[in-house]
Image (cartoon, helix red, strand yellow):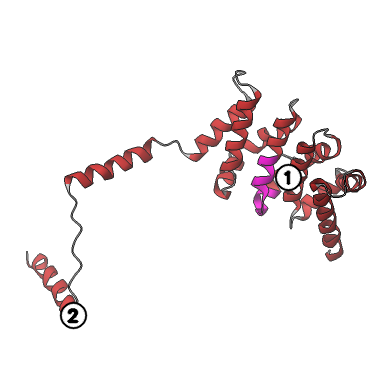
């Protein structure tokens, strides 16, 4: 075929023009092909991240009524790590998963409440679409977070609730408005009055209150 015969001449001519030899073609040995197939098979065997999130959420919710609190907490930690990736968080949003996470804010076990708040706060970090979703009537997590911040006996729960509430309202007017309507500002003032001067919760409360005042001044 005349066209096929021209291709090597063209490549050779091009190489001669710039004075460099063409790069050698990689040699795929039988062993290398087996290695590549092994890598491909291993990747195919890995569960996708949506499946991992679904499994973690089911375990956290204990849908089979078979898990203890430590296993459910481990599942919440796994879910929190997965939603640090904004694409994963948006996939879970599309699947309606955050409405299920919200239910754990009312769990009897304080550590599960804290874990759920941590997942919500992580997902809401610096992403307006997720902030809006979590503040929507469909999910509406702010009242539950504000209640935990006001009323929880556990300092860890209060801290995680404040973390999530802060993430929901960062550069997000609807989140700020919902926090105010849920009594969040009064809770911040109470925290400033009631916490030890150097406590982390008091410092975080002061920071959020200052942010709210600055946002109100700029509106």
Query: Measured along the vertical axis of the image, is residue 75 above or below residue 94?
Result: above
Numbered tag placed on residue 164 in the rendering: 1
Q: Nearer the viewer, residue 189 or 214?
A: 189
Check residue 44 for magenta coloring. no
In magenta, the rendered stretch is: 118-131
Q: CA distance from mark 2 to mark 1?
A: 62 Å
Q: Residue at x 81, y 39 (%)?
A: 143
Q: Secondary structure at mark 2?
A: loop
Image quadrant holding the N terminus, namely: bottom left
Helix, strand or loop: magenta stretch: helix
Relative image position of residue 173 (x, y in whole percent)? 78, 55
Relative image position of residue 98 (x, y in whole percent)? 65, 38
Q: Secondary structure at mark 1?
A: helix
Neighbours of disc 2 within 10 Å: few (<14), some (14-19), many (20+): few
Q: Residue at x 73, y 49 (%)?
A: 168
Image quadrant holding the C terminus, namely: bottom right
Q: Is residue 51 left or right of residue 165?
A: left
Query: Measured along the vertical axis of the image, is residue 6 above or below residue 44?
Result: below
Q: Quadrant of residue 25?
A: bottom left
Residue located beneath label 2 in the image = 19
Disc nearer the start of the sequence (2/1)? 2
Numbered tag placed on residue 139 in the rendering: none
Q: Nearer the viewer, residue 89 or 34?
A: 34
Q: Is residue 114 left or right of residue 23?
A: right
């Amino acid at each position: 075929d005349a066209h096929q015969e021209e291709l090597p001449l063209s490549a050779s001519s091009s190489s001669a023009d710039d004075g460099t030899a063409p790069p050698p073609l990689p040699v795929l040995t039988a062993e290398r092909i087996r290695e590549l197939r092994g890598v491909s098979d291993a990747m195919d065997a890995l569960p996708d991240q949506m499946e991992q999130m679904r499994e973690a959420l089911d375990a956290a919710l204990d849908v089979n009524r078979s898990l203890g609190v430590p296993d459910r907490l481990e599942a919440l930690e796994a879910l929190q790590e997965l939603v640090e990736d904004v694409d994963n968080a948006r996939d879970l949003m599309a699947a309606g998963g955050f409405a299920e996470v919200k239910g754990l804010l009312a769990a009897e076990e304080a550590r599960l409440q804290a874990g759920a708040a941590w997942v919500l706060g992580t997902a809401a970090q610096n992403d307006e679409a997720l902030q809006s979703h979590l503040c929507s009537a469909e999910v509406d997590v702010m009242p539950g977070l504000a209640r935990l911040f006001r009323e929880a006996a556990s300092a860890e729960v209060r801290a995680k609730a404040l973390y999530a509430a802060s993430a929901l309202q960062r550069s997000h007017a609807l989140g700020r408005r919902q926090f105010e309507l849920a009594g969040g500002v009064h809770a911040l003032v109470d925290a400033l009055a009631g916490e030890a001067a150097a406590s982390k919760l008091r410092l975080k409360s002061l920071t959020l209150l200052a942010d709210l005042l600055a946002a109100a001044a700029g509106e």
